[in-house]
Image (cartoon, rainbow, N blue to C red):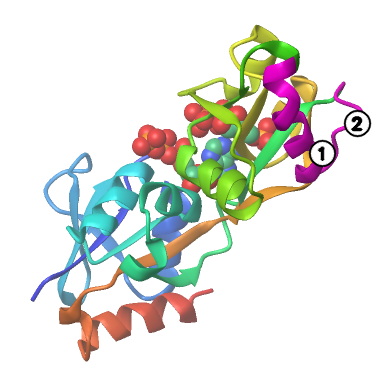
Amino acid sequence: MTITIALPSKGRMKDEASAIFERAGMKITAVGNDRSYRGRVEGWDGVEIAFLSASEIAREIGSGAVDFGVTGEDLVREGLADADARVEFSARLGFGHADVVVAVPEVWYDVDTMADLGDVAADFRARHGRRLAIATKYWRLTQQFFSGSHGIQLYRIVESLGATEGAPASGSADIIVDITSTGSTLKANHLKILSDGVILRSEACLVRARKASHDGNAVVDRIVAAVRGAL
Ligand SMILES: Nc1ncnc2c1ncn2[C@@H]1O[C@H](COP(=O)(O)OP(=O)(O)OP(=O)(O)O)[C@@H](O)[C@H]1O
Ligand SMILES: O=P(O)(O)OC[C@H]1O[C@H](OP(=O)(O)OP(=O)(O)O)[C@H](O)[C@@H]1O
């Protein structure tokens, strides 16, 4: 059985993902030319590399189309309803750090916690004639955090596919849920993170699709051990 590992083909995680595999003694070479979307690992027969984007990798691990992938925990948890049942986070790789956070306008002086935001959401319709609107591309994580962890039910998600931090100023939403790393985009848009508003501290992970065929498979165990040994 061939084991497929999906690695980022582009974007911010590409170079560091390849470097970790190289340190793990798994040197990757493209099959065919440099722009190929398939690769192999020198000296590892039965292992194949698929180069995909970070979000495609999350999806392909969820469906079990690939055995392993390197991608952000945020993309895996956003893409899969029951992530821990479907995949194993085999190793945290120490790069690609980003926090998924709840941020509100800095001028909401009385709102510092999720409990404060719950109070705002509860009166929002009476005051403004509509529900509190949250701009995000992380709708699953937002629903789990607001409804599941904090019992806040009165809100509306406005799907945002880019420039999420601009939504409160443009009036398309009141608050946002997005990723931040240095915090400079939030600051530039006069937004502040709620004190208990960190939904997830994400980083790049080696993620394994949970498959029965992996039980007792020596190659699967060797891949995990090699990557962990390189950290
Ligand atoms: N400052 C940042 N901005 C955006 N994503 C970041 C940042 N820092 C780390 N990440 C992480 O990088 C991953 C997304 O990587 P990247 O933006 O390279 O993907 P992508 O190639 O654009 O994917 P796709 O094109 O499929 O959306 C996410 O897991 C995210 O958490
Ligand atoms: O906290 P900071 O360091 O300011 O980073 C956060 C910003 O970076 C990302 O956008 P990016 O411009 O990378 O575009 P992308 O979302 O298309 O990857 C992300 O969507 C935030 O807007």
**Element at label 2:** loop
Mark 2 Cβ and ligand 2 under 8 Å apart: no
Q: Vertically, is 59 above or below 191?
A: below
Q: Vertically, is 10 above or below 159?
A: below
Task: Write the start and end of the magenta stretch as one range.
Answer: 107-126
Q: Vertically, is 6 above or below 175?
A: below
Circle 2 residues within 10 Å: few <14, some 14–19, many ≥20? few
Compared across the picture, whether 94 is left or right of 24 comes to right
Q: Quadrant of residue 86?
A: bottom left
Q: Which residue is mark 2?
A: 110
Q: Position of residue 202 (x, y in %)?
A: 57, 54
Q: Is residue 11 visible?
A: no
User: Magenta: predominant secondary structure element?
Assistant: helix
Q: Nearer the viewer, residue 56 or 225?
A: 56
Query: Which mark identifies residue 116?
Result: 1
Name which residue type carries label 2: Asp
Q: Quadrant of the C terminus?
A: bottom right
- Asked if residue 167 is among those painted magenta in the image, a careful observer would answer no
